């Protein structure tokens, strides 16, 4: 299960363009155009689509018709040039715009962040700058030839220079934009030919005309704006005389908090003010703010599935003095105690639109929402998962949840652990920490939300107290046992370098005690992420075999079948597959039987004594089954141990990528990927049943990264019916030891080993915790091993 690419909510100081480099040329203010547009005008421009933190996947230009009759724009175009550029790119328009209607022109996409766009009226492919550029509405479809200054060209109906670096505009350019902000016309019905005065920088709103509200501003407190709900009751209104003390700030805004809270714990007293550029206020400033109340939906985790955060945009800020930052609201013992088991128990669909009760006392989703934007503290938070590559660290208050033997918190079918919150490095570096550690003292920060999670943003780097958790080792198998292990080696290929191969080798030799048979997942082809059309992985596996020998281990050899190119996943351009490695110095022997291939199914045959065998070994399990589309096909191998047959099937089922996040707006979360894993489990279970139909006492091991939990329907399908049930080895462990993976601080089973019933009495099983709980991982999965004593049929 590989991590998805992610980026931050908002990094206002970081300006990223969709494709075009920005020039540092000086700003030239153009003279006003001859006359304001009599009908169609540009009402919004956005160039950060798909970039880091973007709310939408695409750039866009929005038009509206201020005339009294429809305007046919067939034959017109929207054109774009960079901030200093003289070359114009063209998107041709079609159709007509009714009076007062918005017309949406979708342009190029960036890196894929953000929510999908509303349905556009026309689509183009122009990659606009996120910060500064020039957009022209032109009454023909020929690229402008007027160079870098075109606002007065006779064919130009309207013109916007956006960002201070734009060298042409109507009178003056708009403010500088970012990945998270657009320039929108303050009054869609008004065009004074002054971009700087006509446009304001704020949240993108494609297809929705924004205007100065006809209602007067509403005097409000922060808790009035936040309300007891996931969206503000004042959304779309201008709030005035909003008072508070600045608690923290970032590159494009600041948080402030009312030091005089109301008595309702369901309404937050903290709020984010979006300034679009670096704020000039200081922490501890007493401020009065007027601004538009908006809901910002951050990118990441699919964007559209994220909750919104409430904020003030287009603000007017008055500093009235200085004040002490309010004491942090403590989360945990002695303060606001989060619900212990339930994330959401009363919604059916979108929590932002359903009319269910807002219940912070019992629903984790509502609990954290009621603290959004507030200055919080957690006393000696306990670490439940390692610092991730995104510099996020999962913590819980003391005394939370069902804890693992090593200090994690266990994901269960009826408990997703709403106590968890992720520390994020938006405001200060987050240190490396591992499961079982603590953070010293009261850790303080503000509460935000992004990537399907509530984020706790400390302002001072916490100090880590070592919890003493070390990497586990397992015991070696005895002379009468055969040890079988599974290990996800996480997109392994030669370009990973010696350090990774040596680390894996040390794990095999020292932590796993050199198992007899090793099922590997995520073995990538020899050239890694290069899409060469070649899928061979012999160099990858040879390199691992050699590294194990250098680490003092035995000689291994391997068996695998190359997949069809670009059909079974892996890093972009690469191909991953499952494989067997086995020792050559033990009594375990691989039964090589020719005939296998990437699209050839192995079947069950019998010898003269009626004993089952694989028609090809190694062989693929049901590769033509649609269940394996874009997924690794399982590999079956036939082994012998002291003359006894042992059938092993190594698997890597479909990932959970695409499922709704636990902390998303849709509750309960929809696991859209689960049905495919159910189909995959049925295919593997059917294969096992064919073996057991020939010999009910056959020795069978099914293992691998199933990307599903020990209590899941996927596992239930693999276990099967009572008479021929497989034993799911994770279910034999005490609850507090039942995990092989840690995701966003939740310890959980994704990797599993299942064995046929006759193998259970003389077996021992161990999940070797050496990766998932540590920030310095050689893989994000913990390996596991089962030690078996295969018995001849006459004993069974």
Image (cartoon, rainbow, N blue to C red):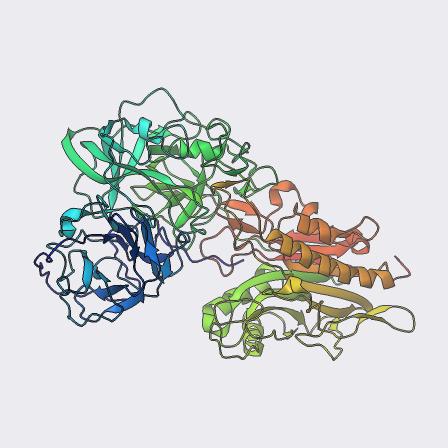
Instruction: Say left or right for 426 vs 301.
Output: left
The reply to whether residue 8 is in sight is yes
Residue at position x 47%, y 72% in the image: 529
Residue at position x 31%, y 23% in the image: 261
Residue 530 vs 477, above or below: the answer is below
- The image quarter containing residue 16 is bottom left
Q: Residue 417 location in percent, x, y?
A: 52, 38
Residue 573 vs 744, above or below: the answer is below
Q: Residue 465 location in percent, x, y?
A: 40, 42
Q: Where is the C terminus found, in terms of image quarters? A: bottom right
- The image quarter containing residue 214 is top left
Residue positioned most to the top: 263
Q: Nearer the viewer, residue 248 or 133?
A: 133
Instruction: Say left or right for 91 vs 362.
Output: left
Residue positioned most to the front: 69
- The image quarter containing residue 233 is top left
The reply to whether residue 515 is in sight is no
Instruction: Say left or right for 751 vs 222.
Output: right
Q: Residue 234 location in percent, x, y?
A: 32, 31
Q: Nearer the viewer, residue 94 or 287?
A: 94
Q: Nearer the viewer, residue 451 or 700?
A: 451
Q: Residue 593 location in percent, x, y?
A: 76, 78
Instruction: Say left or right for 623 vs 39.
Output: right
Tag count in the figure? Answer: 0
Q: Where is the N terminus found, in terms of image quarters? A: bottom right
Residue at position x 45%, y 32% in the image: 366
Q: Nearer the viewer, residue 643 or 117?
A: 117
């Amino acid at each position: 299960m590989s991590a998805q690419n992610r980026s931050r909510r908002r990094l206002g100081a970081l300006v990223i363009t969709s494709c075009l480099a920005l020039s540092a040329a000086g700003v030239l203010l153009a003279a006003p155009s001859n006359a304001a547009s009599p009908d169609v005008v540009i009402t919004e421009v956005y160039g950060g689509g798909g970039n880091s933190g973007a709310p939408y996947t695409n750039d866009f230009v929005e038009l509206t018709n201020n005339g009294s009759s429809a305007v046919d724009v067939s034959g017109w175009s929207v054109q774009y040039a960079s901030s200093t550029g003289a070359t114009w790119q063209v998107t041709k328009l079609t159709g007509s715009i009714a009076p007062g209607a918005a017309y949406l022109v979708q342009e190029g996409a960036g890196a894929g962040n953000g929510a999908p766009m509303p349905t556009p009226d026309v689509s183009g492919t122009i990659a606009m700058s996120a910060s500064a550029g020039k957009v022209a509405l032109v009454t023909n479809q020929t690229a402008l030839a007027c160079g870098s200054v075109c606002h007065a060209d006779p064919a130009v109906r309207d013109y916007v220079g956006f960002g201070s670096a734009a060298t042409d505009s109507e009178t003056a350019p708009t403010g500088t934009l970012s990945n998270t902000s657009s320039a929108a016309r303050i009054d869609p019905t008004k065009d004074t030919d002054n971009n700087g005065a006509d446009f304001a920088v704020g949240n993108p709103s494609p297809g929705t005309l924004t205007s100065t509200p006809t209602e007067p501003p509403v005097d409000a407190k922060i808790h009035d704006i936040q309300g007891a709900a996931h969206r503000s009751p004042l959304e779309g209104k201008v709030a005035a005389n909003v008072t508070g003390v600045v608690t923290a700030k970032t590159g494009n805004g600041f948080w402030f908090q009312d030091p005089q809270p109301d008595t309702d714990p369901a309404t937050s007293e903290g709020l984010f003010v979006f300034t679009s550029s670096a704020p000039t206020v200081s922490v501890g400033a007493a401020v009065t703010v007027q601004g538009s109340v908006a809901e910002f939906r951050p990118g990441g985790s699919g964007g559209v599935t994220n909750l919104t955060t409430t904020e003030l945009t287009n603000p007017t800020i008055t500093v009235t003095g200085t004040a002490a930052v309010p004491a942090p609201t403590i989360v945990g013992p002695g303060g606001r105690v989060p619900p212990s088991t339930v994330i959401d128990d009363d919604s059916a669909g979108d929590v932002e639109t359903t009319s269910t009760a807002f219940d912070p006392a019992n629903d984790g989703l509502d609990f954290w929402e009621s603290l959004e934007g507030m200055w919080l503290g957690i006393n000696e938070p306990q670490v439940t998962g390692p610092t991730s590559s995104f510099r996020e660290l999962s913590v819980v208050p003391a005394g939370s949840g069902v804890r693992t033997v090593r200090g994690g918190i266990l994901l269960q079918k009826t408990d997703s652990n709403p106590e968890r919150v992720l520390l994020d490095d938006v405001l200060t570096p987050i240190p490396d920490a591992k499961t079982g550690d603590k953070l010293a003292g009261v850790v303080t920060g503000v509460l935000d939300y992004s990537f399907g999670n509530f984020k706790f943003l400390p302002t001072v780097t916490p100090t880590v107290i070592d919890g003493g958790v070390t990497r586990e080792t397992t015991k070696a198998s005895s002379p009468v046992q055969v040890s079988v292990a599974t290990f996800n080696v996480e997109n392994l290929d030669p370009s990973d370098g010696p350090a990774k191969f040596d680390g894996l080798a040390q794990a095999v030799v020292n932590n796993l005690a050199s198992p007899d048979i090793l099922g590997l997942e995520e073995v990538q082809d020899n050239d890694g992420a290069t899409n060469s059309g070649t899928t061979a992985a012999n160099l990858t596996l040879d390199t691992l075999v050699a590294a194990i020998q250098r680490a003092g281990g035995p000689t291994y050899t391997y068996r695998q079948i190359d997949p069809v190119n670009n059909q079974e996943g892996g890093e972009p351009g690469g191909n991953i597959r499952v494989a067997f490695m086995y020792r050559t110095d033990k009594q375990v022997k691989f039964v090589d039987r020719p005939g296998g291939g990437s699209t050839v199914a192995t079947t069950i045959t019998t010898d003269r004594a009626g004993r089952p065998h694989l028609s090809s070994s190694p062989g693929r399990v049901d590769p033509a089954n649609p269940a394996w589309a874009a997924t690794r096909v399982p590999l079956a191998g036939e082994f012998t141990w002291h003359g006894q047959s042992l059938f092993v099937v190594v698997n890597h089922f479909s990932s959970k990528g695409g499922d709704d996040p636990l902390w998303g707006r849709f509750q309960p979360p929809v696991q859209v990927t689960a049905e495919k894993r159910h189909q995959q489990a049925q295919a593997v279970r059917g294969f096992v049943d064919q073996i057991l139909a020939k010999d009910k006492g056959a020795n069978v091991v099914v293992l691998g990264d199933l990307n599903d939990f020990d209590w899941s329907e996927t596992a239930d399908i693999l276990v099967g019916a009572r008479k021929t049930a497989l034993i799911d080895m994770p279910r034999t462990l005490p609850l507090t030891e039942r995990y092989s993976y840690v995701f966003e601080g939740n310890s959980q089973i994704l990797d599993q080993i299942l064995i046929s019933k006759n193998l259970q009495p003389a077996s021992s099983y161990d999940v070797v915790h050496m990766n998932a709980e540590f920030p310095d991982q050689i893989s994000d999965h913990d390996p596991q091993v089962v030690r078996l004593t295969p018995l001849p049929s006459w004993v069974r």
